[in-house]
Image (cartoon, rainbow, N blue to C red):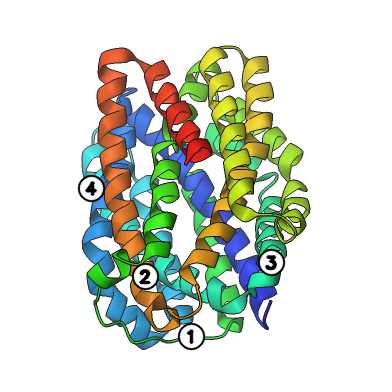
């Protein structure tokens, strides 16, 4: 772990808090303002990913030229601007707001993930990467513990305007902290095909694609909102309780990952996540949501941390350092395209077979993680 990593972890924590709230409560706002239309809510994120996919390749050279720090600051500013459509969102303008939000959110994501991965790989040592990633995620969890409850209270009392202002403050704090981290530059050549032909990248993408396939939290957020009969406060309370239960888990897991086989850990956490989705498939009461989400919080953290460490290990395989930025860009392009296809497939399943079929898809994807 190198100088500046702790400051970056704090900045990342505020970013994670804002981004998670934007994904959960923002999705619910689009769902409500469109007349409880889940296709609009999920479609907003699919459209933003389409924009991100378009921008990724063209932004890569620009990011390498200005450096990771300034690229991440720009991404925070774009995220900050993306709160504007939420502030003015209503039943009459939701489609225009969705388009504007998706465009800005797509720019923000395209400017975020490439420098984030590049920076973390360069700021962490492989032998202690599990501990470093665990610390980063633990700080994020601790700072974000009570934010869902606060967001739920604000959303319930002040609507999408109060929600938007809260998120904007968190993104602003994240951008300010970015001033203290090093600025890493690279020279992107645009070689995607060569990167995708690397054995370690093919191996990593198999697992990352399956992880994308099981990421159905958008549908789950809408399902929770239905179970709690459209209560923002109860949605915030349940999310806060779940965060509280899992907040101390990352540091323990991070140290464990440094001493054990990371692929085996990924398979174990894939099994945990699959069983968590099975629990979600079966619950339809507030108590059931609390129990299943508490378990899912632990399994999601475990899967995310295991997958992140596993991914960074494969991306930074010795002998391919000169291709690091190319590998990151190629991976992001593939995963963005995959997420769009997953969203389309999930909406089709939902239309014909209902919410449960989407959760079954997540279970099958996690079984794939275990078997591969």
Quickly name the residue at label 1. 184
Give the mark nearer the N terminus: 4 vs 1: 4
Instruction: Give the quarter of the image for residue 98.
Output: top left
Q: Quadrant of the N terminus?
A: bottom right
Q: Which mark is residue 132?
A: 3
Question: Badge 1, how many Cα within 10 Å: few under 14, some, many 20+?
Answer: some
The percent position of residue 365, horizontal first and vertical second, equals 43, 34
**Residue found 21% across the figure and 61% down from its top:** 54
Please give left or right for residue 210 compared with residue 290 in the image.
Answer: left
Quote the CA–CA distance across marks 2 and 1: 16 Å
Question: Badge 3, how many Cα within 10 Å: few under 14, some, many 20+?
Answer: many
Question: Badge 4, how many Cα within 10 Å: few under 14, some, many 20+?
Answer: some
Give the mark nearer the N terminus: 3 vs 4: 4
The percent position of residue 76, horizontal first and vertical second, equals 45, 66
Report the mark closest to the observer, 2 or 4.
2
Quote the CA–CA distance across marks 2 and 4: 30 Å
**Residue found 58% across the figure and 64% down from its top:** 12
Give the mark nearer the N terminus: 2 vs 4: 4
Quickly name the residue at label 2. 327
* Element at label 2: helix
Q: Which mark is residue 99?
A: 4
Can the viewer see residue 96 in this picture? yes
Report the mark closest to the observer, 4 or 1.
1
The percent position of residue 108, horizontal first and vertical second, equals 37, 62
């Amino acid at each position: 772990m190198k100088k500046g990593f702790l400051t970056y972890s704090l900045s990342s924590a505020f970013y994670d808090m804002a981004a998670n709230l934007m994904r959960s409560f923002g999705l619910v706002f689009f769902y409500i303002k469109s007349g409880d239309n889940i296709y609009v809510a999920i479609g907003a994120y699919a459209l933003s990913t389409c924009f991100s996919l378009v921008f990724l390749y063209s932004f890569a050279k620009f990011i390498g030229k200005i450096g990771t720090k300034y690229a991440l600051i720009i991404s925070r500013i774009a995220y900050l601007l993306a709160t504007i459509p939420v502030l003015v969102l209503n039943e009459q303008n939701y489609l225009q707001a969705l388009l504007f939000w998706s465009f800005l959110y797509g720019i923000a994501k395209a400017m975020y993930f490439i420098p984030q991965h590049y920076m973390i790989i360069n700021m962490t040592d492989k032998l202690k990467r599990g501990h470093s990633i665990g610390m980063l995620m633990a700080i994020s969890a601790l700072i974000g513990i009570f934010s869902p409850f606060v967001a739920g209270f604000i959303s319930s009392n002040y609507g999408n305007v109060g929600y938007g202002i809260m998120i904007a403050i968190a993104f602003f704090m994240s951008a300010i902290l970015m001033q203290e981290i090093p600025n890493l530059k690279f020279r992107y050549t645009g070689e995607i095909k060569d990167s995708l032909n690397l054995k370690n990248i093919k191996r990593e993408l198999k697992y990352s694609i399956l992880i994308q396939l099981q990421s159905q939290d958008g549908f789950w957020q809408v399902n929770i909102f239905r179970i709690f009969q459209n209560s923002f406060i109860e949605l915030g309370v349940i999310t806060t309780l779940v965060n509280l239960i899992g907040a101390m888990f990352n540091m323990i897991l991070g140290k464990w990952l440094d001493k054990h086989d990371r692929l085996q850990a990924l398979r174990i956490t894939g099994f945990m996540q699959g069983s968590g989705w099975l629990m979600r498939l079966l619950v339809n009461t507030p108590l059931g949501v609390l129990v299943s989400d508490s378990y899912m919080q632990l399994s999601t953290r475990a899967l995310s941390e295991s997958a992140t460490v596993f991914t960074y290990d494969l991306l930074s395989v010795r002998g391919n350092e000169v291709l690091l930025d190319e590998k990151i860009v190629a991976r992001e392009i593939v995963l963005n395209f995959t997420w769009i296809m997953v969203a389309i497939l999930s909406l089709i399943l939902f239309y014909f077979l209902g919410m449960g079929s989407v959760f079954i898809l997540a279970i099958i994807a996690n079984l794939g993680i275990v078997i591969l």
